[in-house]
Each structure stands twice: as C-alpha cells, then as structure tokens.
C-alpha cells in the first residue's frame, strides 16, 4: 500500500508543470520525499534525483523514473485586446480545448478558452473541424494589452485547472484521508503524475527492500529530454519507467470496433514493446512471475505505440528497461480518468519486483 | 451583486426543470418584495408596490432563468449517451459534468487519446454520437442512480478573472437575472411611482414559454426585458457585437416600443451611463419577442449585457456592465409614472385638423 494521502495526490495532479517549467511539482515532491531519502539533488536539466537506501544494498544500480511535466499551452503573444495567443508544448489534444479554463503562469491566474458562439457560425463545416490551436485565445479578463502584460508574459505556460475528484455521487475527501483502495478518479496531468505517485510511494516506504535511484524527470512530453540527460548522467544498470498511459476502452461510436490499448480496472499495464524500445525480455518475465506469485492483476499494453522515458534513458548506453503504467483514459486533455485499484496494484507489483530484480537479470546474462 | 451572480450561475436550472432554481430565486427576492409567488410553470414573480395611489402603473422587469443543458438518452454499461440542445458539441469534449440523477453525479466527457488518432481524426471534432459520459460507476450502480431523461450540466464554478471580469456558465441569462434582482434591492431606498413586477421566466431557451404565460397572467402596462447579447471577441462579426464593459446595450427596433427605447437612451445620457445600441430589424431573439404580443400587446423595452463565448460554460462578463444596468433599470422604474405610461398609447390623428 501507498503512504500517499488523498491530499498529496490532489496537490500532485493539480499543480501545473509544463515542459521546462516543472519547478512547482519538483518542489512539492522534494519536500515530501526529503525526510525519507539519503540524498537529493537536481541535475543540470532540472531532473530531481533521489538516492533511497533499501533494507539491503542492491547488487546493481536500479533507476526508477517518472516524468513531472505535463502537456501545456505556451503563451506566444499578447494581443492589443489583451488576449493570450498560444502554441502547444507537448501533444495537447486540440479537440478538448474549447470552453475550458486554465491556470496561467506561476501565479496560476485563471483564464478561459472561449470560442465564437455557434450563432456566428457561417457554415456547418465549422462544427466538424477541430479548431487550430493557433486560432484560439485565452481570456484572462484583461481590458487591453497593458492590463494583460502587467500580469503575464510570453513564454509562460497555461495548464488545465481541473481539480482531483472521485467520480460518482458527490463526496468530499479530506486531504489527510488515505487514498481509497478503489474507485475512479478524475483530474489533470495523470500522464505522468500517476507515475510520480507510484515512485513516491516507494520513496515514502521506509522498509523498501533494496536501494533505488528515483528520477523525477523533466521535458518528457517534448521528446524525453530529461531522461536523455539522466541516462548518461546516472548510468544505471537497469531502468524502470513508470507511466500514466493511453487507455481507449470506451464504447466509442456505436458501430466502431477498436483496440483499447489498455483497459481501466484490469491492473497495471506492462509494455512488451512500444514505438521506441523492446522491453528487456527477462525483466518482463520477472514482472509476470512476481505478479502471478503475489496475485497482482496485470495487462499488456497494445504493442508498438508511444514512447517513454525508458527510451530516453537507454538512448546512449542501452541498458535493460522495463515499463509499468497506470491506464488513464482521456490523457493529454483537461480531465483524465483512472482506477485507483490499478494504481495500487502497480505500486505493489513494482515493490515486489525489487528484491529479485538483480538475480532475475543476472541469470539471463549471456554465457 | 457578485454573490448573487455566483449563486445563480452555479445553480441547476435547465429549461423545463427550473423548480429548484425557482425556489432559490424566490428566496433572494423575498426580502425586497411585498409579494413573491411561483406560478404553475415555475415562473418566479415578485411584486414591489409603488408609491403612487392606485391605480398605479405596473412595470414588468423580466429575465429568463433557464439555461441550455444536455439530457441522458441511453445507459450503456458504465457509460451514458446524451443529447444536447443549443449546446455546441465541440465545447463538451473533455468537460467535467454533473448528471442530475437521484443525486448529482460527477462524470467526464472524455476524448480518445490523441496518440491513437490518425491525422484525419485529429482534424475533426467528435460527433455527439461519439461521446459518452464516463461516470466511473459500474453498470448496476449507475442504473440505480440515473435514468434516461435526466439532465446533464457542465460542472463549472464561477471564476474571477482580472479586474471586473468574471467567467462561468449560464451567464445567459443569470447575469440579467442578477441585474433585475439587484434593481429590486436598489429600489428599497428609492421611491418609484408604479408597481415593479419582477419575473424570472422559464423556458426561454425552448420556446419563450414562460414569457408568454407570465405576461398573460400579469398583463403589465409596460415591460423591460433583459437578456445577454454578443460580446466582441476574436473572429466575431463587426456589427451586432459589443465590447465588454461598454455598458448596457439598448435594443432598437420593431420588437420594442420606441418611447421605451428613447426613455432608456435618454436616461443613459442624463445619468452619463456608457451604453451601446443593438439594432434589431425584426426578432430580438429574446423574451421581448413574446412579451410584446401577449395579452393584447405590451409596450416593451430591451436591455442587454454583452458576454463572450455565449452558450459555453465559460461565458465572460464584465461587472461594470452589470452595475450600470442596475443603475439604468432603477432610474427607469423611478421614471415610469402614469404620465409616461399614458404617452405610450398610440393616438389617432386629430381628424378636425386633418380635414381642415
């Protein structure tokens, strides 16, 4: 089980951290984990690196990574009327932008993404085409450019402002409450704060079986930049990347069949191969053995799509990698949905995999 | 004033289902009225008596209180299908919503992960039939909470933006309703000759039903209808749109009685209230269209306030417009005496003069 509280997950997901602007989330994580780790540092790119002693020393250098950044909108211009123009920083789903509210800059100023009333539409085509991000503006209530420029500047990030919630009938949890064992949660930035939460759960565990190096990376969403730097900087023997990953298990339109990639509620997703790495087969076998032994449900992620920090880490030195993910519906939009039992099972699987990890890899080394 | 707006815009009041909202509105009106009633369709009617001896002129101030909404059309396992009316479906993708079942239930209208879309799919918005509400409940539990026909609204607390600007849902037309209620409050300390009858009408977004029935029942001597109009924003037409903060927008055209329009404009001038005119060659698209022809005809005026992103969950308004509108309405109620009402009547020419 995780020592994470509802309030920690709430703050972790609600805090804005666009690519290259991860400071607020980094500070939050650093404060929480500092009493539980032996060393804590930030590298040249902004990756937060924590050395955590386990009950026994690991015979190999195990790095576990999760990225702190989330997809963001990036202010490119403030126009004469005080509207903020934007570009996408990371793969924001443009279909989800209309009619949403965002937090602007480090002051987390409220703003809204409006759109012309349908009354002004000139033809019905307009209702079917996805608006171009470059045509959208954020309205922060400024009377004119001067009022806007007094509060924001180009280069600042704009991030969805969705609060963390339990789905279903309205109920409120206190920040001190433990994370419920199951239930659907909704919020922003589950890609990859679910990974950060998984990694934090290991760090807050003072009976962690073996030593690990935890890496909370930056700039994953614009090309695995933090992992690329940390891979060579740390030179671990093995890397496990933790993700909040794609899930497409909706009924969709009524006549369409699709492969869901992952399914909510079927347990953490194990990657066999994505668009960038083949997971080290002995490591995958090890995860599956441990899952069976501890009766932890798992599922395979649909192969050949996407890429994670695992590829960034392995880029220079080619170390074995593994990927464990929490399935999340609607990622890269304002409100994702995840199942807490998948998250907890992911933490359990990762923790239970650590003691025999080195021997599992060693026994498969070449003769 | 802002408190009232916040309370009203965050409330639940789809067209045809205004009962809960009606009770909330009546509660706000009560301390400022001599009589408050809710009629059979849930129009809320508050009467504040005037100072002149009876028979006094009876001025109706009307703002509709219903809002656009969605409705559950099918329950599919853990998901809900839904339909909308007047809601641009593009705005619904990615929204957090409240499903008003046995109790309100939080749900998400999600979209496919962009990672899995091809270029053609990315460039097209999902159709309403492609969308579902994800309630997070299993099929069996969901069926005990929700049934087909239940209303769905976007979950959206009001946001305070910079300066005097606010954003939220249902500013169409709770912004106007706030102006009307705040006028009642202002009239507590001002003498007005005629009775002021305030109506929070139902069903405007459907078919102006509340405007029709309330006016028929009340038969006022004159009326001013309040509704929102289009704010200027990037890409908006150059005419018929108004800068936020430019003050109340006075409707001009055949839907409106010229003497009431002139009076509203004169009051703006004499009180130095910044204002605009909206030129309406025919249908104003508001309750005024119905009020004008109901119960033998009612001389009607129209006052609007501009909002951006109309019919979205993030309508943006300027509180300066709201305060100025309250000043204008208060002044109008003070000025609407019997002489003014008498002048509204159209007169036959003096035949003696014509023939001579």
Image: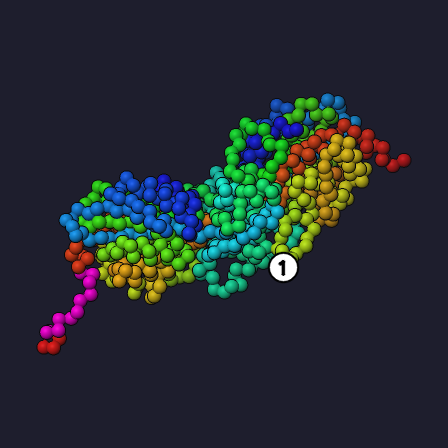
Which part of the image, by quadrant, shows the C terminus of chain A?
top right
Left or right side of B2 for A157: right
Instruction: From the viewer's perspective, tell me whether residue B335 is left or right of residue A317.
Output: left
Residue at 25% over, 55% down: B220
Residue ID at (69%, 47%): A261
Q: Is residue A129 above or below residue A332?
A: below
Q: Chain of mark 1?
A: B
B164 or A74: nearer the viewer: B164
Q: Residue at x 44, y 61 (%)?
A: A120
Number of marks present in the image shown: 1
Give the answer, above or below, for where B215 lies relative to B138: below
Q: Secondary structure at mark 1?
A: helix
Q: Quadrant of residue B356?
A: bottom left
Residue visible at 42% across and 61% down? B237
x, y (%) of residue B55?
Answer: 16, 52
Q: Is residue A266 above or below residue B341?
A: above
- B310 vs A131, left or right, is left
Please name the residue that numbered disc 1 is placed on. B120
In magenta stretch: residue B198 = no
Quarter of the figure with the N terminus of chain A: top right
Name the spot of residue A88 as percent of width and height, x first. Answer: 57, 49
Residue B201 visible in image: yes
> At which x and y percent is residue B321?
33, 49
Task: Give the magenta-colored segment's residue range.
Answer: B343-353
Based on the displayed image, in which of its 4 quarters is residue B239 positioned?
Answer: bottom left
| Image coordinates for residue A122, horizontal then vertical, percent | 47, 64
In this picture, residue A25 sits left or right of residue B332: right
Asked whether residue A155 appears in the rendered view, the answer is no
Determine crowd level at label 1: few under 14, some 14-19, many 20+ residues with C-alpha closer than 10 A: few
């Amino acid at each position: 089980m995780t020592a994470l509280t509802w309030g920690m997950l709430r703050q972790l997901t609600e805090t804005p951290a666009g690519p290259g602007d991860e400071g607020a989330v980094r500070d939050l994580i650093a404060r929480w984990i500092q009493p539980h780790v032996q060393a804590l540092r930030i590298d040249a790119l902004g990756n937060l690196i924590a050395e955590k002693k386990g009950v026994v020393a690991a015979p190999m250098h195990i790095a576990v990574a999760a990225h702190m950044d989330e997809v963001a909108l990036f202010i490119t211009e403030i126009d004469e009327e005080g509207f903020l123009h934007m570009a996408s920083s990371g793969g924001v789903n443009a279909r989800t932008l209309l009619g949403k509210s965002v937090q602007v800059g480090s002051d987390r100023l409220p703003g809204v993404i409006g759109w012309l009333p349908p009354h002004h539409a000139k033809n019905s085509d307009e209702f079917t085409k996805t608006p171009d991000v470059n045509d959208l503006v954020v309205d922060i209530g400024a009377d004119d450019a001067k009022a806007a420029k007094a509060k924001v500047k180009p280069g600042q990030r704009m991030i969805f402002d969705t609060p963390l919630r339990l789905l279903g009938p309205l109920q409120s949890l206190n920040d001190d409450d433990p994370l419920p064992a199951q239930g659907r949660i909704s919020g922003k930035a589950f890609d990859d704060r679910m990974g950060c939460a998984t990694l934090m759960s290991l760090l807050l565990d003072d009976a962690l079986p073996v030593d690990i190096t935890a890496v909370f990376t930056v700039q994953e969403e614009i090309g695995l930049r933090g992992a690329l730097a940390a891979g060579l900087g740390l030179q671990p023997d093995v890397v496990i990347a933790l993700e909040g990953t794609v899930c497409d298990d909706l009924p969709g339109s009524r006549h369409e069949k699709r492969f869901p990639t992952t399914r909510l509620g079927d347990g953490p997703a194990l990657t066999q191969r994505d668009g960038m790495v083949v997971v080290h087969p002995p490591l995958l076998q090890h995860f599956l053995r441990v899952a069976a032994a501890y009766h932890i449900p798992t599922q395979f992620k649909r192969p050949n799509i996407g890429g994670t920090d695992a590829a960034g880490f392995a880029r220079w030195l080619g170390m074995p990698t593994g990927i464990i993910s929490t399935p999340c519906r609607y990622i890269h939009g304002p409100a994702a949905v995840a199942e807490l039992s998948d998250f907890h099972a992911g933490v359990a699987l990762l923790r239970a995999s650590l003691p025999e990890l080195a021997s599992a890899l060693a026994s498969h080394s070449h003769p | 004033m802002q408190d009232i707006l916040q309370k009203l815009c965050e409330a639940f009041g789809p067209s045809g289902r205004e009962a809960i909202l009606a009770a909330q509105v009546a509660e706000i009106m009560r301390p400022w009225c001599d009589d408050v009633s809710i009629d059979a369709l849930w129009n809320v009617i508050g009467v504040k008596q005037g100072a002149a001896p009876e028979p006094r002129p009876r001025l109706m101030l009307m703002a509709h209180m219903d809002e656009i909404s969605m409705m559950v059309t099918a329950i599919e396992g853990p998901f809900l299908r839904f339909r909308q009316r007047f809601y641009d479906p593009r705005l619904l993708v990615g929204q957090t919503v409240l499903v008003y079942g046995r109790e309100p239930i939080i749900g998400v209208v999600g979209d496919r992960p962009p990672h899995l879309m091809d270029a053609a799919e990315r460039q097209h918005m999902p159709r309403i039939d492609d969308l579902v509400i994800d309630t997070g409940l299993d099929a069996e539990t969901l069926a005990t909470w929700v049934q087909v026909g239940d209303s769905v609204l976007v979950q959206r607390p009001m946001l305070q933006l910079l300066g005097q600007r606010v954003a939220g849902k249902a500013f169409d037309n709770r912004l106007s309703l706030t102006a009307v209620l705040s006028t009642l409050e202002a009239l507590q300390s001002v003498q007005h000759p005629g009775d002021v009858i305030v109506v929070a009408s139902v069903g405007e977004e459907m078919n102006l039903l509340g405007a029709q029935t309330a006016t028929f029942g009340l038969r006022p001597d004159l009326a001013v209808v309040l509704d929102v109009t289009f704010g200027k924003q990037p890409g908006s037409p150059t005419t018929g749109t108004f800068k936020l903060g430019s003050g109340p927008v006075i409707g001009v055209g055949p839907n409106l009685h010229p003497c009431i329009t002139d009076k509203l404009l004169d009051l703006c001038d004499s009180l130095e209230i910044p204002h605009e005119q909206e030129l309406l060659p025919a249908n104003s698209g508001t309750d005024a269209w119905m009020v004008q022809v109901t119960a033998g005809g009612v001389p009607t005026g129209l006052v609007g306030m501009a909002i951006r992103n109309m019919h979205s969950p993030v309508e943006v308004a300027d509180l300066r417009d709201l305060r100025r509108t309250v000043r204008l309405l208060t002044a109008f109620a003070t000025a609407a005496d019997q002489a003014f009402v008498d002048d509204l009547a159209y007169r036959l020419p003096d035949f003696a003069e014509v023939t001579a």
